[in-house]
Amino acid sequence: MVDVDVLVAGAGPVGLTAASELARRGVSCRVVDRLPARLPYARAVGVQPRTLEIWDRMGMVREALETAVPLKGQLLYVNGEEGPRIDLRLPPEVPYGFAALPQYETERLLEDLLIRRGGQVERGTELLSFEQDADEVRAILSLPGSGTEELTARYLVGCDGAHSAVRKGLGLSFEGAALPEEYMLGDVEVDWDLPDGYALRASRVADGQTDDILVCVPLPGVKRYRMSMATPPELSRTPPGDGDGVAHGLSGDQGPVPGIGHIQAVLDRLSPRSTTASSLRWSSVFRISHRIVGRYGRGRVFVAGDAAHIHPPTGAQGMNTGVQDAFNLAWKLAAAVHGHARAGLLESYDAERRPIGEEVVARTLRHVRSGIQGDPDDPETLMLREAQLLMGYRGSPVVAPGGSAPEGPAPGDRAPDCGGLLHALGAFPVRLFTLLREREHTLLLYADAENRPTSFDEVATAAARAAHGLLNTCVVLAPHLPDPAPRLPTVHDSLGEFRRAYGARGGEAILVRPDGYVGMRAAPADGPEVRTYLESLFAV
């Protein structure tokens, strides 16, 4: 007999995302973290637009928007000369921009969400070891103070960082290497007159090589920044780690920490404006590695976030990629816990997320060596990729083949947002993402003047049965179509934005997965494709 459905090791943004989504789906979950309290460090700071979309689906984007600050772009200086400014502009149909939010605030918001859903974090509790068989995972936990506990779970998710005990327990490879550079971080205030909302990258280049660098990312507050720079010799120390050879992350208390004078010395050398640093909140030294796990899980045990991939912080990809790992895994894991998942649904986590991890590791490594300006893509594509809006799962074993429209997203692509959706009882239009918030699979059925929704009731009934009820249906009507009989939830595409965003055809069915990707498209909707696809995911 199992004690809990899922054990989550690690209460950073990745573990909290997984636990919160599992709790929302009625999965019993224990979240353990070896640290006695949340770290007060502004480590991962950049929040990508795709992560804000995920937080929208999770039901916590309002709190994030109220806490974060906009990240408008980056100012570049080389040898004191100003370079081209990078403005973080996205197409107007993208609902959220780039943001800056200290990791401890991200963790606070996610933990608050978990608590609202009935969960909690067990701090000072560490996963010591585990073993698994075909039916369960047996784990040993170290408890606060002293003592141990034996725990049996259906599944284990390792979100326990670069030195992951879960990854080691599975015996997974973690190929890559450490970068030779060593950096220091500091959270300070400055009194310069640089424009608000812009990050700063200032460097000194000699003989084509960068020999000094300063990177400043704005934080909530007045003229407050998280700064990173090369470590001076007197602060250099042995790489952090626990004997596993993975030199990645903050040094903790393994030696002297940078003081305000160390940061001021770099500002004196590289800042484009004369400025004085003050109000040092925390500082540390850190190392960077690039590594990718051989597979994202085995049997009933999975890894996510830094436990699966680590890489340079260029472009703020790490935490955001890990959050997407957890979001992808949670709905599949919940289906398995409730006995609804077909064989292969859980295995698709590795098939979908590991290629993403490999691409992010390779891209961030390329950018740290040659700069983002050296990327061969056009500026718009580059910006969308950095925003993590181009990540997708075409060719995934749990995405329907084909089904692409002349325009709009194909199966496996991110499901875009759109506005102008008007309910008969509503005095104002709403966004599609509002309709998708905290939902499972959503079947969107589009009707126009030539293809009226005569058979949509039967389509929706068959789809809900195939998905064990884990599906919502919404009829989207072309502008000026009269409302049908009120059997299914219905909205009018009053501005035509849905048709344009999705390239929707009359009588078409578009299935959006719980993680915000298109699972399949079928025209006409009343063919066998919808039911067949859902039966490939869910056990009959």
Image (cartoon, rainbow, N blue to C red):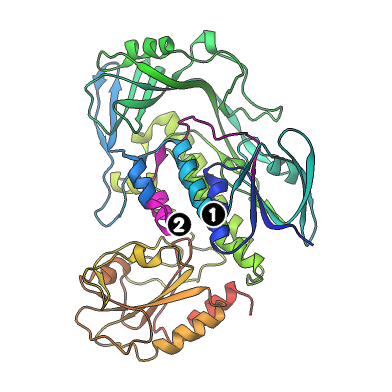
Residue 171 x %, y %: 74, 43
Please state which amino acid type lies under the numbered disc 2.
Answer: Met
Q: Nearer the viewer, residue 42 or 291?
A: 42
Residue at 29%, 47% in the rendered image: 380
- Asked whether residue 42 is drawn in magenta, I would say yes
Does the rendering let one see residue 376? no
Q: Quadrant of the C terminus?
A: bottom right
Disc 2 target residue: 58
Question: Label 1, label 2: how many angstroms apart (C-alpha)?
Answer: 8 Å
The label shown at residue 95 is none
Residue 79 x %, y %: 30, 16
Task: Please state if 123 lies on the left or on the right of 183 as rendered.
Answer: right
Quarter of image, res 340: bottom right
Q: Quadrant of the N terminus?
A: bottom right
Residue 384 x %, y %: 34, 49
Please state which amino acid type lies under the numbered disc 1.
Answer: Ser
Q: Nearer the viewer, residue 417 or 36?
A: 36
Task: Please state if 422 lies on the left or on the right of 174 as rendered.
Answer: left
Whichever of labels 1 and 2 marks the residue nearer the N terminus, that label is 1
Q: Are marks 1 and 2 in contact (CB under 8 Å)?
A: yes
Does the rendering let one see residue 64? yes
Q: Nearer the viewer, residue 362 or 25?
A: 25
Task: Give, as a single range, the part of the protein colored magenta.
Answer: 32-61
For label 2, count other residues whose C-alpha is less than 10 Å away and answer few (under 14), some (14-19) or many (20+): many
Residue at 78%, 62% in the rendered image: 135
Disc 1 target residue: 20
Dot 2 lies on which element?
helix
Q: Is residue 484 above or below residue 196?
A: below
Q: Nearer the viewer, residue 205 or 143?
A: 143
Q: Is residue 198 above or below residue 410?
A: above
Residue at 29%, 28% in the rendered image: 222
- Asked whether residue 354 is drawn in magenta, I would say no
